[in-house]
Image (cartoon, rainbow, N blue to C red):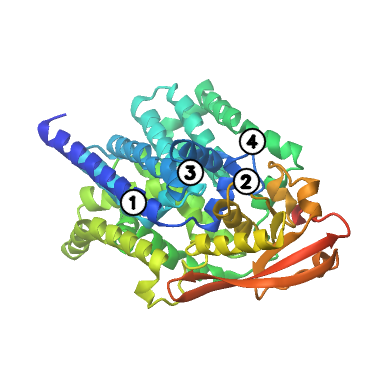
């Protein structure tokens, strides 16, 4: 490595570290989302699987809270630090696939300034470890291509296994790899090599705890996640959401570079065949499935997270390696120059808006329901009402409210979701003594109490209403109902819809 290359690598590392520090500062300021609070509860009872996802997100949160405590910063710490191995992996993958550190540095920075990576590592969801695993997988496959050594398939298997422990979407990496091997003539020899199958064994071994957990719980998580879209639910209107949401999550300038890079790779204008096909298969296999899925059900923007490492490499190819016509080159130059600043500014504005609402004039926006601004003050009111009336446990109708209550109420408080008990199957249940006393049921004011719950108590009384505020905006108004004299089992233990 010459002096210029060393300087470029050092500057890239410093830029990534600066972005990580920015996210750490945002993590300390921003209250938890309801999903993060829910996953935090998982982290207190680690298991091989959960109703919604595999266990990696719970492990990530557990590690962070062991270091920094049960605070928003602690919950998010390790997730944000995962950007470091993610960045290393994408840097090396781009360097190996397309030669040269300029393209490697560009891919690394472009990935980090997308909202998918910036917010996706700040807000702890299964997408954070999935992004890292997808980047490590791309690097491992690049090493297979570069070295021709079979042992690298073990690293491929380990990366795929970690991805599977993060989110079921990683199952699509298997077909993507097989299509890549079949499409590149010189790689077809791996179908006859034991190394490919040993890599599969490694991936299956890492994924085994999730399989065993599902086997012990009637395969409920697999059924839930893999039965989302059915052919009879034909609703093509969801297709219209795909491009606008990814335009925002990639940030506009990175999105333009990525699309142009994918076009250039499809036209064979950069890279060797093996590298071109690898980027395309890692991107299009998942995108084609989600496009089909969008014909039947909504596809959430973050579900595209596993394609972003490949997309960032394609964007770097467009920015650095492809020769464009003059008009196209002007677009490329503009996007390359401003992609990072625009990404950082958009991230900062999003954090300011989520915490204050000032950019929308304190009116409602897309962040106001999911980010728990005002929940600490609300929890203090709820706790005061609980103590005043002698309630022994707090109930809520949904997992998000339960998560927020558990996180923001005093440590050790009894909090439970009255229904959907499958979500809490790994966690200790409230004791009979806690459920036999007075109970406090917390729900949004416009939500009526289910008749089955109301009829199960001798006395039901609304004792207070409490607002969750973001500045002058009332986000939600909660009713606090006191329940006394249970006539039967307080918790609804009906099986989940997937098992009915």
Tell me, for residue 94, which label it has, or none.
none
Residue that badge 2 annotates: 412
* Label 1 – label 4 distance at C-alpha: 32 Å
Tell me, for residue 25, which label it has, or none.
1
Residue 41 against residue 387 in the figure, above or below? above
Q: Secondary structure at mark 3?
A: helix
* Label 3 – label 1 distance at C-alpha: 23 Å
Q: Are marks 1 and 4 in contact (CB under 8 Å)?
A: no
Residue 194 against residue 495 in the figure, above or below? above
Earlier sequence position, callout 3 versus callout 1: 1
Residue that badge 4 annotates: 48
Residue 351 against residue 78 in the figure, above or below? below
Q: Secondary structure at mark 2?
A: loop
Earlier sequence position, callout 4 versus callout 2: 4
- Report the residue at 53% width, 21% height from top: 194
* Label 2 – label 3 distance at C-alpha: 31 Å
């Amino acid at each position: 490595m010459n002096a210029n290359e060393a300087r470029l690598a050092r500057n890239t590392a410093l830029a990534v570290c600066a972005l990580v520090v920015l996210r750490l500062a945002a993590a300390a300021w921003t209250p938890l989302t309801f999903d993060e609070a829910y996953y935090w509860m998982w982290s207190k009872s680690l298991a091989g699987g959960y109703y919604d996802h595999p266990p990696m997100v719970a492990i990530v949160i557990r590690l962070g809270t062991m270091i920094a405590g049960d605070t928003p910063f602690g919950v998010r710490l390790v997730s944000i630090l995962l950007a470091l191995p993610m960045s290393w992996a994408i840097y090396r993958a781009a360097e190996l696939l397309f030669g040269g550190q300029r393209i490697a540095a560009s891919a690394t920075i472009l990935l980090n300034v997308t909202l998918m990576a910036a917010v996706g590592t700040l807000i702890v969801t299964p997408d954070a470890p999935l992004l890292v695993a997808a980047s490590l997988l791309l690097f491992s496959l690049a090493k297979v291509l570069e070295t021709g050594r079979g042992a690298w398939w073990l690293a491929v298997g380990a990366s795929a296994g970690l991805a599977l422990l993060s989110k079921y979407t990683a199952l699509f990496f298997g077909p993507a790899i097989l299509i890549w091997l079949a499409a590149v003539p010189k790689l077809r020899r791996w179908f006859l090599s034991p190394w490919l199958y040993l890599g599969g064994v490694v991936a299956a071994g890492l994924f085994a705890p999730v399989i065993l957990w599902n086997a012990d719980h009637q395969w409920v998580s697999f059924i839930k996640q893999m039965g989302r879209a059915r052919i009879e639910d034909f609703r093509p209107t969801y297709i219209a959401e795909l491009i606008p949401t990814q335009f925002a999550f990639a940030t506009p300038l990175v999105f333009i570079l990525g699309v142009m890079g994918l076009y250039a790779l499809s036209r064979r204008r950069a890279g060797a065949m093996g590298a071109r096909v690898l980027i395309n298969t890692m991107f299009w296999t998942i995108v084609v499935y989600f496009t089909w899925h969008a014909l039947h059900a909504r596809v959430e923007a973050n579900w595209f997270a596993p394609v972003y490492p490949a997309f960032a490499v394609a964007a770097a190819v467009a920015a650095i390696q492809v020769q464009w016509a003059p008009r196209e080159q002007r677009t490329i130059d503009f996007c390359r120059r401003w992609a990072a600043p625009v990404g950082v500014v958009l991230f900062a504005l999003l954090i300011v808006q989520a915490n204050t609402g000032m950019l929308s004039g304190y009116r409602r926006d897309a962040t106001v329901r999911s980010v728990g601004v005002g929940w600490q003050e609300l929890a203090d009111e709820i706790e005061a009402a609980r103590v005043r009336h002698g309630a022994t446990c707090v109930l809520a109708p949904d997992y998000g409210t339960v998560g927020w209550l558990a996180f923001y109420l005093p440590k050790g408080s009894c909090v439970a979701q009255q229904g959907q008990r499958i979500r809490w199957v790994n966690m200790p249940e409230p004791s009979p003594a806690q459920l036999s006393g007075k109970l406090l049921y917390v729900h949004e004011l416009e939500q009526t109490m289910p008749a089955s719950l109301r009829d199960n108590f001798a006395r039901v009384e609304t004792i207070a209403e409490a607002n969750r505020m973001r500045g002058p905006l009332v986000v939600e108004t909660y009713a606090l109902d006191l329940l006394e004299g249970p006539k039967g089992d307080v918790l609804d233990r009906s099986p989940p819809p997937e098992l009915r």
